[in-house]
Image (cartoon, rainbow, N blue to C red):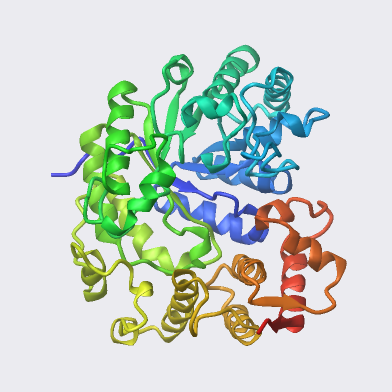
Amino acid sequence: MSNLPFAIRGFNLCESLLRHSPEQLRIFLRRMNTLQMNTVIIHYDYGWNRYKNIIMDECRENRINPVLMTFGPRTFFSYTDWKEQWFAKAPDGNAWTPELVCETQPCTFEPEGLEAFQYGARKWLKSLPEEIKHVHMRSGDGIKFCQCERCRLLPDHEKWRPFVDIFADAVREVRPELNFETDLYVKRYNIPEKKTAFQKMTNIMFDDFNRHYAYPLGSIHDSDSAQRVRVAATEKIPDAPTANAYLLKRLSEWTNTFPGKVYIHENVMAQCLFTTFVHNLSVYLKDLDIYRKLGVQGVCYEAYEPGYSGFASMFSLLARALNGENVEYEPDEMEKIMTAPHSKTYFYHDPDFPLEKYIRDPIRLKQTEMYRYIEMIRITGGKASYRYSAEFYREFMNFYFEHEDRFDTLMAGYQLAYTGRKLKHLDFKGLSDEANEFLSYEKLWDYMETVPLDEDPRRKCRNIILELMEKAFTIK
């Protein structure tokens, strides 16, 4: 017996729009029709101005609901002569971010900043074309919420709630016909004391970013992810021992309090995994059963065209399940090992795991081996034999450039260089001003959005990465 289709079935392109060519974006959106996906989340801050005509044309043609997402602090303050004092402060009193970027958070106790946020929200809503029917306002994760003397006395999720209220009021006053929503994310998974704004929303996105991918939500087998609970939670002492158990508790609270509104954002392709497949389709299928029981409205999976081919079979099966089909799926041996209770986390955390025994595709095998090396650098802190080197950077990027049709090459080229320099494993001799500026940004998408509309951001970043490869040297 089949289930009813989920109301929301789609993808979230996150901050990846500018890493697409126009043709890649068209391919991605047209495929959604084939998969019977009906919702795509488009990031206003990163690529909308360049690709809005393509997006609206393809969504109209393929019967897709585009949800226009924006980072409220970054976008709304940009309509004003913003002041750094409006931004969230670190414990030392200085702003976490001195410029408007995706991680910018506001301070709750800056009256002028609150007024500016309201002004910018209204200006943004008035600027949107009539074809846009659904908007989403969020901020970066709450790790950089304000720690000024007054804000630090508030629970983290209450620091953000006044800005959600401002946005909800602005929508009702400026564009009352719009569907609108916000997200539940790191440090704001708790239901706020004042619920009015959420009661007015069309939908509420639950972003399960800190979950452990190898187990379904609610599992307590993700014992090695205990630290993720403390990262995600508002509470100093969370009420669950693992991230997956904690997230299911919060999801249940939100679906009970706001029935018919909540849907999931699933970070499947996890941008800094460099298009590494994580072998957990059986887990996502089990999650869908959990979501049905809770009354969750659907799922938008993180996805983008660069690297999509490695996930195509997964998304094909997930689309069928979202559409109500009872999907029969037998995990392969690697997935069974990875998702077994108390398994040794991920295959890429074990340098002795015989990847060649389970991955037959030689291109995917080499990519996974190289990604495992990167993970070992992270796990060991760059000690022992695991370090970034100029030779590794060049080998990695030459391989990705050779197979650009299969991998998210620009993200890899930027992230490896940025992280290698930050860890003082790598540096670069005689870089151009453009390359130095490229590496000065904490997030690739913040840099790419600075590229003028008459230049190709993909070509520009590709050329910079080629320069980084040429000029990289290893710090001994």
> Which residue is located at x 27 percent, y 69 percent?
344
Q: Is residue 468 left or right of residue 420?
A: right
Q: Is residue 153 above or below residue 227?
A: above
Q: Position of residue 464 (x, y in %)?
A: 76, 71
Q: Position of residue 204 (x, y in %)?
A: 43, 30
Report the front residue among 229 and 340. 229
| Residue 176 visible in this rendered orientation of the protein | yes
Quarter occupied by the C terminus = bottom right
Q: Is residue 298 left or right of residue 141?
A: left
Q: Is residue 446 above or below residue 24?
A: above
Q: How many marks?
A: 0
| Residue placed furthest toward the left | 1
> Which residue is located at x 78 percent, y 29 percent?
79
Quarter occupied by the N terminus = top left
> Which residue is located at x 49 percent, y 18 percent?
197
Q: Is residue 147 left or right of residue 231?
A: right
Q: Position of residue 224 (x, y in %)?
A: 30, 59
Report the front residue among 219 and 53. 219
The answer to which quarter of the image holds residue 256 is top left
> Which residue is located at x 25 percent, y 51 percent?
216
The answer to which quarter of the image holds residue 73 is top right
Report the front residue among 135 and 91. 91
Q: Position of residue 18 (x, y in %)?
A: 67, 55
| Residue 160 visible in this rendered orientation of the protein | no
Report the front residue among 304 and 73. 73
